[in-house]
C-alpha cells in the first residue's frame, strides 16, 4: 500500500503563522524530486504545536498541492484517545491516504490501555492506520507481542518504527497474518531496516535530500549494492547532524541554507546553537547539497 522514501515534512512558519506559499513550494519540490509520500503534521511537522484549525489548513494545503501525485499521510497524535479520533476523522474527511498515530505519550498507559486506544481509533474510522512506535518521544517501546496484536485491528496497514531493534521487521513479518507496510523512522539505521525486510522509511533527512533518499531505496530494490552502499555512507553524517538537537530545529536550519524555508520554529522549540549550525553546514557540504 505504501513504500519507499516518505518525507516527514516540516511545517514552515512566517511570523508564527503557517507559511502557505512555502508549504506549497515544498510539496511541489518533493513531487519533482521523487519523494514517494508525505507525512503532514507529524513530529517533524511540529504537529503537537499546531492548533486544530492549523492542522486542518496544513493538510488541506498539502493535499491540494500534491494533487494526487503522491500519498499524503496525516500525523494524528495525542495522549487523548478522543482527540486522536477527532484528528483521524478530520483526516479522513479531507482525503488523507492514511493516519500515522504514535503511542500515547505522557500519560504512561499500560499495554491494555495502548491496545484499547488503537482499537477505538480503528473502530471510529475507515482510514488506514500506521502505528508509530517512537520510544524517544513517548517513553514506551512497544513490545513485539503488542505490535502483533495491534496489527490485527482491521484498519491497521503498517508500522513506523523509530526504535533501533533491528529484529522487529523480521519478527513482525513472521508473526503477523497481514502484509504490513514496515517503515523505519530512524534515518541512521534505515539501511539496516531495509536489509531486515522493511519497505522504506519515513524520513527526516528526505526534507533536504529527497532525491538521494529515494535513490538509496531504489538501489536496494534493484540489488545495486555498490550504489546503495555509496549513498548510505554519504548520507550518514547528515543523518547524525540533523539529530544533534531536537528535531526539527537542525532540519529547519538546513532547509534555510537551501532557501527552502525560514529558520523559524514554534515555541518551545528554538533555533539551534552555533556549534550545531556548523555541523549541519559541514554535513550538507559533504553531501554536495551546498557549496
Image (cartoon, rainbow, N blue to C red):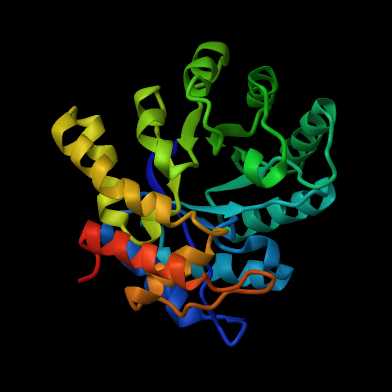
103 sits to left or right of 192: right
Can the viewer see residue 23 in this picture? yes
108 sits to left or right of 252: right
Residue 273 screen position, x and y as percent: 51, 71
Name the quadrant of the N terminus.
Answer: top left
Work out whether 79 lies above or below 257: above
Can the viewer see residue 37 in this picture? no
Work out whether 272 lies above or below 169: below
Q: How many marks?
A: 0
Which one is nearer the viewer's eye here, 41 or 92? 41
Name the quadrant of the C terminus.
Answer: bottom left
Which one is nearer the viewer's eye here, 183 or 157? 183
Which one is nearer the viewer's eye here, 116 or 236? 236
Work out whether 105 lies above or below 43: above
Which one is nearer the viewer's eye here, 207 or 65? 207
Residue pictured at 35% horizontal, 34% vertical: 191
Q: Residue reaching furthest top?
A: 174
Residue pictured at 37% horizontal, 29% vertical: 192
Q: Residue reaching furthest bottom?
A: 15
79 sits to left or right of 159: right
Residue pictured at 63% horizontal, 43% vertical: 136
258 sits to left or right of 39: left
Q: Residue reaching furthest front?
A: 275
Amino acid at each position: 500500500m505504501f513504500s519507499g522514501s516518505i518525507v516527514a515534512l516540516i511545517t514552515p512558519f512566517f511570523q508564527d503563522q503557517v507559511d502557505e506559499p512555502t508549504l506549497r513550494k515544498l510539496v511541489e519540490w518533493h513531487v519533482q524530486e521523487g519523494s514517494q509520500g508525505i507525512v503532514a503534521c507529524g513530529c517533524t511537522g511540529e504537529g503537537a504545536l499546531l492548533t486544530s484549525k492549523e492542522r486542518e489548513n496544513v493538510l488541506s494545503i498539502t493535499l491540494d498541492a500534491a494533487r494526487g501525485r503522491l500519498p499524503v499521510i496525516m500525523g494524528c497524535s495525542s495522549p487523548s484517545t478522543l482527540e486522536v479520533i477527532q484528528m483521524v476523522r478530520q483526516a479522513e474527511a479531507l482525503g488523507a491516504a492514511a493516519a500515522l498515530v504514535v503511542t500515547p505519550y505522557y500519560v504512561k498507559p499500560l499495554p491494555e490501555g495502548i491496545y484499547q486506544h488503537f482499537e477505538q481509533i480503528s473502530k471510529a474510522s475507515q482510514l488506514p492506520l500506521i502505528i508509530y512506535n517512537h520510544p524517544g518521544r513517548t517513553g514506551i517501546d512497544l513490545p513485539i507481542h503488542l505490535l502483533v496484536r495491534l496489527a490485527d485491528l482491521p484498519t491497521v496497514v503498517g508500522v513506523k518504527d523509530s526504535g533501533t531493534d533491528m529484529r522487529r521487521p523480521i519478527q513482525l513479518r513472521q508473526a503477523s497474518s497481514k502484509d504490513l507496510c514496515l517503515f523505519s523512522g530512524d534515518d541512521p539505521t534505515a539501511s539496516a531496516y531495509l536489509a531486515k525486510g522493511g519497505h522504506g522509511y519515513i524520513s527526516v533527512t528526505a526534507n533536504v535530500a529527497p532525491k538521494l533518499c529515494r535513490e538509496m531505496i531504489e538501489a536496494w530494490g534493484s540489488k545495486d549494492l555498490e550504489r546503495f552502499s555509496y549513498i548510505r555512507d554519504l548520507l550518514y553524517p547528515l543523518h547524525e547532524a540533523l539529530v544533534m538537537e531536537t528535531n526539527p530545529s537542525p532540519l529547519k536550519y538546513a532547509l534555510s541554507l537551501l532557501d527552502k524555508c525560514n529558520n523559524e520554529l514554534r515555541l518551545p522549540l528554538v533555533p539551534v546553537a552555533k556549534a550545531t549550525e556548523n555541523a549541519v553546514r559541514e554535513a550538507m557540504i559533504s553531501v554536495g547539497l551546498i557549496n
